[in-house]
Amino acid sequence: MGRHREFDVEKALDKVLCVFWRKGYEGASYSDLTEAAGVERPALYSAFGNKEAMFRKALARYYDRYMEYIPAALRLPTAREVASHFLHATVDLNTRYPEHTGCLGINGVLAGSDHAEPVRQALIDFRTDGQRQFRERFERARQEGDLPETADPDALATFVLTIAQGIAVQAKAGTSRDRLKTVAYQAMSSWP
């Protein structure tokens, strides 16, 4: 019996992440994942578990590696700066890598088979948590007088996330970075 080939789990996870980012959860086959990771299927299972567990690890890695702009945005002094930074950074991330455009958190599984339902729900939870963070930040902005008393923090969070999600879908469809920047500017023109 041959020895199992050693491999760098962190590098393999980065490669698996890119496959999921490019093809989504259901579009990524085990052949795609093993080829990208450079290992056989048993080694991939051993390192990450099943495909769903692998996707969840890839999603956590995606947030840690690529979405640092969200906490950075949330720390900015005004709600307008928060929203503007977030939208412009979203355009940047969603168009930065021509081989995997869009957003893993949006395009991973919008609609899928019953088998993919746990992953679809994990992505809904991922997006809901992001919306909660923005709502809380905008509530603070309203309390501090940065937003008018009439501003609805939940509606503003929904608005910003909806624009960001639309940017992700459009980027995946090939819309240019410059065009998506104009969308972010247009969205900010209606900020209270």
Image (cartoon, helix red, strand yellow):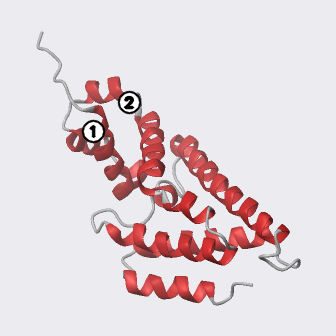
* Residue at 27% over, 24% down: 42
Q: Which residue is mark 2?
A: 48
Res. 130 in view: yes
* Residue at 51% over, 60% down: 106
Q: Quick check: marks 1 and 2 in contact, CB under 8 Å? A: no
Q: Secondary structure at mark 1?
A: helix
Res. 166 in view: no
Residue 162: x %, y % from top left: 62, 71
* Residue at 47% over, 60% down: 107
Disc 1 crowd rating (10 Å Cα; few below 14, some 14-19, many 20+) is many
Position of 8 with respect to 179 (left or right) is left
- In the rendered image, the residue lying farthest to the top is 1
Q: Secondary structure at mark 2?
A: helix
Amino acid of disc 2: Phe
Q: Quadrant of the C terminus?
A: bottom right
Amino acid of disc 1: Ala
For residue 12, the mark is: 1
The image quadrant of residue 57 is top left
Alpha carbons under labels 1 and 2: distance apart? 10 Å
Residue 41: x %, y % from top left: 26, 30
For marks 1 and 2 on the same chain, the one whose residue lies earlier in the sequence: 1
Position of 2 relative to 105 (above/below): above
The one nearer the camera, 24 or 135, is 135
Residue 89: x %, y % from top left: 47, 70
* Residue at 80% over, 65% down: 139
The one nearer the camera, 104 or 160, is 160
Position of 34 with respect to 141 (left or right) is left
